[in-house]
Image: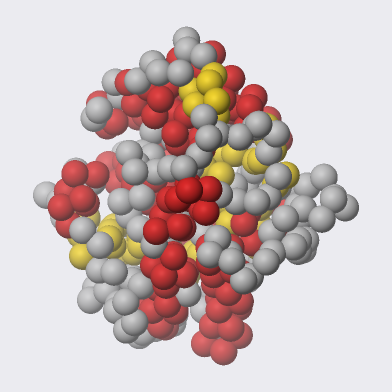
Amino acid sequence: MDRLRSEAYLEDLDRVADQADWSCLDGATIAVAGATGMIGTFLVDVLMHARARRLVDARVLALGRSERKARERLPYFEDTAFSFEELDVGVPGSKPAEQADVVVHLASTTHPRAYATEPVGTVASNVIGLMNLLEYACARPEEPARFVFASSVEVYGENRGDVERFSEDYCGYLDCNTLRAGYPESKRCGEALCQAYAAERGVSVYLPRLPRTYGPTLLASDTKAISQFIHRGVEAHDIVLKSEGTQTYSYLYVADVVAGLLHVLAHGEPGVAYNLADERSDVALADLARTIAGIAGTQVTFELPDETERKGYSTATKALLDASRVRQTGWEARYDLREGLARTIAILQG
């Protein structure tokens, strides 16, 4: 599948490019850590697309652990406005050689099997990697680079049963003494680290908190439930549900996530967290499976998860985000759940 030959995908890029306020990025070099991930790839595509349309004069510095993977995912190596640096930001002391004006930290493992099999790397990317990149931002001669840390719905922990939706000041239960806690706890620590660098080193940090994200840039290795459902839908196989499916979560199409991230950078207040979500994309897991099966023309079946998958699963049964704060700044999601899923499957099917 060549996503950049898909009319639907190019339409997505146009929508985000037209929605964004590019004035804050004109003339900037933007370092994107985790550039080959689902969100990072879409962000790089949008930045390069907006430049090609002459909406912004900006350069992209893509950061990732594998140049081979980057060449497979990012077809911009011959473009003078693009550069790639092979770098594992989770290694203590690592930092890019090229300077940047804006840093976007998206490098993180974000699916259950990785949480269970790469727990050290999960924590390292969200804490050590973040600190490396914050130090890198502070090394800019004039003033620290502006910094975006993609946080997560997981910082809220489990719903205590006292709210319907998580506002940005909510704090639910989280058992830190578990393997699975590595991801949410490191995201919590990451936000605290951002606040420390803002106070002590003057870094302008922007904190979008993301829901469960999906879209046509998802990786084949992604083991999140929605990603597994989509992979099977693309192949016209039955959708396999590995629980009763009563868990209810907020989801968002990757185009809306990237649009929200760019909006927070342009219009958000530094140091303030913003939930990105859309009530039209809140759904129980079983209904999500049925929606994808309906789009793909298949059925929903049930299967027990294997032990590794089970270790990586979230124990949260209800995690819905209140996005009223970001809506007050003028941002709204463009895609409802069914449209986002249908576009994802159609683009991946080519």
Q: Is residue 267 above or below residue 145?
A: above
Residue 130 visible here: no
The quadrant in which residue 2 appears is top left
Count how many numbered circles sit on residues in the image.
Answer: 0
Q: Nearer the viewer, residue 65 or 332?
A: 65
Q: Inspect this view and state whether residue 82 appears.
A: yes
Q: Residue furthest right?
A: 162
Residue 122 location (% of width, % of height): 44, 65
The answer to which image quadrant residue 302 occupies is top right
Q: Is residue 240 left or right of residue 320?
A: left
255 over 7 or under it: above or below:
below
- At x 21%, y 65%, the residue is 86
Residue 298: horizontal and vertical position, in percent?
A: 47, 12
Quarter of the image with the N terminus is: top left
Q: Residue at x 51, y 53 (%)?
A: 312
Rendered position, 133 above or below 49: below
Q: Residue furthest left?
A: 78
Residue 285, percent across and down?
62, 32
In x, y percent, where is residue 42? 38, 43
Task: Name the colour scheme.
Answer: secondary structure
- Which residue is at a point 53% across and 21% down the rendered structure image? 301
- In depth, the one of 88 and 57 nearer the eye is 88
